[in-house]
Image (cartoon, helix red, strand yellow):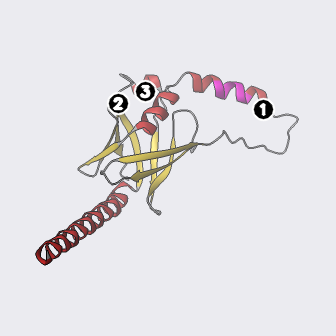
Amino acid sequence: MKFRNIFTQKVVILFILLVLCFSCSVSKKIEQDKEKLTGRWTLAKASFSDDLLKDFNGQIPYLQFENKEGISGKGFDGCCYDCIMFEMLKNNKNKITISVKVLPLQLSFDGNDDIYDIEEDMRKWVERCKKVKREEFTETFQKSTSYKLKNDTILILKSHNSKLEFHKVVH
């Protein structure tokens, strides 16, 4: 009976040590990836598009990763600059969850509200947004469940049936 208890204790201690080692390596990888991801990444390929320039009217979406807590940033969805705020969270299966907040359009005024036609500007903005695949991009981005870095310059985000590929902008 004593042998069984000692064996059980050793197995439990070994299991705890393995879990601690694995969680430390995942945390280390997140930190390494955060450094590599910091900066601007431009969309290069998307599973929903054969021609990104045409589908986004010449204004290609991008992600801007910030060097803050976790892996997060903002981006351009093909319609509205800095309207996407995102955070990539890793779960214990080395997969990711992407939390996206789409911010409303922000308009600035020059103080002459009577000359500025907000309705006309909104109509133009809505029409421009309808002409691009903004929703497809945001939906595909948000549904991504894993990512892969190639040579620190190519970022691939995948879900089970879609894929986005970004290239890092190097200055």
Instruction: Using the numbered discs, state the Cα–Cα distance from disc 3 to disc 1 in whole angstroms.
Output: 28 Å
CA distance for labels 2 and 1: 37 Å
Q: Secondary structure at mark 3?
A: helix
Q: Position of residue 128 (x, y in %)?
A: 60, 25
Q: Amino acid at mark 1?
A: Ile
Above or below: residue 89 compared with residue 164: below
Percent x, y of residue 136: 47, 28
Q: Which residue is mark 2?
A: 162
Q: Is residue 36 left or right of residue 55?
A: left
Amino acid marked by disc 2: Ser
Q: Tell me the crowding category of disc 1: few under 14, some 14 to 19, or many 20 or more residues within 10 angstroms, Cα based.
A: some
Q: Are marks 2 and 3 in contact (CB under 8 Å)?
A: no
**Of circles 2 and 1, which is in front?**
2
Residue designated by label 3: 53
First in sequence: mark 3 vs mark 1: 3
Left or right of residue 142, residue 154 in this image: left
